[in-house]
Amino acid sequence: MLKILKLATRNLARYGRRTLLTAGLIILGIVAVLVFVSVSGSFKSLIVGQITDSMIGHLQVHRKGYVASIDNLPLNLNMKPAAVDKVEQALKGMGDVVASSPRLKLGAMFSNFTETTNIRLNGVIPEREAATVPLLPERLVQGNAANGLVERGKILIPEILAKGMKLKVGDTIVLVATNLDGSVNGKTFLVQGVLGDVTGPGGRDGYIHIDDARELLRMTEPEVSEIAIRLKNPARLAQTKMQLEQALSGISNPQGQPALEVHTWEGLSPFANIAHMIDLLDLFIRIMLVGIVLISVMNVMMMAVYERIREIGTIAAIGTPPRRILTLFIFEGLLLGLIGTLIGTAVSLGIVYVLNLWPVHFAFARQIIQLAPSIAAADVVLIGTIVLVVAVLASLQPAWKAARMDPITALRHV
Amino acid sequence: MTTVVQAQRLEKIYRTGDVDVPAVRGVDFAINAGAFVAFVGPSGSGKTTLLNMIGCLDKPSAGTLRVLDTDIATLDRSAAADFRGANLGFIFQDFNLIPVLTAYENIEYPLLMVQDWPADKRRARVTELLAAVGMADQADKRPDQLSGGQKQRAAVARALATQPKLVLADEPTANLDHDTAYRILELMKKMRDEFGTTFIFSTHDPKIMGAAEMTFTLEDGRLVNGGGKDA
């Protein structure tokens, strides 16, 4: 094998410029794929991480029909305490669940005593909310996360509201909410902090203590609108969702149908479509790489066979077995792929290193994103394998033609 | 004396379109081991076709051709390649050295790629042959750095590398000047004497024919004179 490899190397070196051009094309393809995959992967994981870790959590449990009407924050579709207990019990038995946070969501009128507007609020148990969405406290641009997140009688307000109504930490505001029975109730709060806005559902919500929310709504029972769940391994999202659905299937409404629904963050956030689009672009760029390698290697190998017909006739005439001639040409294609893969990977790693030394910032909606791209070893192995396999496949036809060549015809070739 | 090549009513017909073109027509001959034989005749007389059949590169259309006791008509493509690799050596009119390999590596090629000789035996054999053809000081040169005569010397050494019983040379001197051509034939004869190899070559040059110990004259695919001075 080594002797064939040596000869294949010399044959590639013989047509140095052509070999360089073809290897250059493969290098370009590999760099494009690896850099794109690392940058898009960094962007995706950053945004997904922000959505799941600062707002939504990985999974949410709601009463059936709640999500369909979530824009109205309907109080009549909250989960009753018995159902909440059953969900909590089910979650305790699941090893993949790290934390969960019951939320009471409501819409309220928000006033600084001179101006009035609307606000969407989450009533939360501070410690559990902070454990379920750990990046939420980091969104504070003013104030602090005392009591884990928010204290009784205090409120965290979104930045857009703070700016619009010229509010700062320590100011007093009043919330007025309509209760389930149609009456209204008001309660004053101190501004504990201001939360930076993020894109997505819940990105401009306010936070109060769940007991304050119940008080404001004059709730007699500890009802809950949703339970947000954080997983140990987000990659097991689909399996955990199925497991949870199974565990909750016993909870039914009076019509005998399942009373609760489980949603993943993908089902609740429109960014999931962008994430799928990025995956699709990943796939397209990989297909383009396959095309580049296939066409360039096949072209160069066909040229190599055509230009060396007499040489092939000579080595066939002196008794070189056809399988060795086949192997020789396949090795030439494989070597081209290998050179391209090694240099392409090295260049890609260099580019990613530079992108980490001088990070790229760009605006996404109202946020400034700083990319921290990285290349996973699995991606390098997968893309390298694709290139090598395609290089061999592209060499097969020319190599087969060379191995099957009639020595007399080949020796007569001018 | 052992017969290395025996042809009986040997024919080769090529078909071009709907027309049959006979290249060799009912030829009978026998060549003994250690002979230095020339097939002579004008262009198109069938010399190359005959050499191609003896070299298992082509098959007869009719008649029988036995080379080293093997009926070559029975060999398939792969078996013919193995037979050539094991028993035959080839010298070509255009030398046909592999351009990316040095003279040394070209001679080594059949030992490495055809017969899988171990490194030490390969080294000894190539060194012996380089010395025998007077190319020891040109071993590291690539074909484009060699003269025509040097290339053909290297080609002769390559043909002899695997110690074949029979070497076939199709117009081995056609691209060489007369003096160089004569020296190449002398070298081939010396190799025959040294290694006991049978040499069969073709030529249309009357001055070169004289170097052969036995000549077969072909005209229009027929053997018109078989045996020459030693027939």
Image: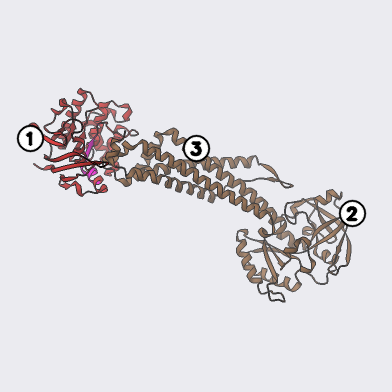
Chain colours: A brown, B red
Q: Observer-nearest residue: A142 or A40?
A: A40
Q: Is A214 situated left or right of B223 in this image?
A: right
Q: Residues within 10 Å of mark 3 (few under 14, many from 20)?
A: some
Chain assignment, label 1: B
> At 42% across and 47% down in the image, what residue appears?
A393
Q: Position of residue A281 (x, y in %)?
A: 59, 48
Q: Which mark is residue A24?
A: 3
Q: Observer-nearest residue: B210 or B221?
A: B221
Gap between marks 1 and 3 measured at Cα = 64 Å
Q: Position of residue A275 (x, y in %)?
A: 63, 52
Q: Is A174 situated left or right of A203 in this image?
A: right
Residue type indicated by callout 3? Gly
- Callout 1: SS: loop
> At 68% across and 42% down in the image, what residue appears?
A361
Whether A69 is drawn above or below B220: the answer is below
The answer to whether marks 2 and 3 mark residues whose Cβ atoms lie closer than 8 Å is no
On whether disc 2 and disc 3 are found on a single subunit, the reply is yes
Q: Quadrant of residue A2?
A: top left
Q: Which mark is residue A112?
A: 2
Q: Residues within 10 Å of mark 2 (few under 14, many from 20)?
A: some
Magenta residues span B82-93
Q: Which mark is residue B231?
A: 1
Q: Which mark is residue B143?
A: none
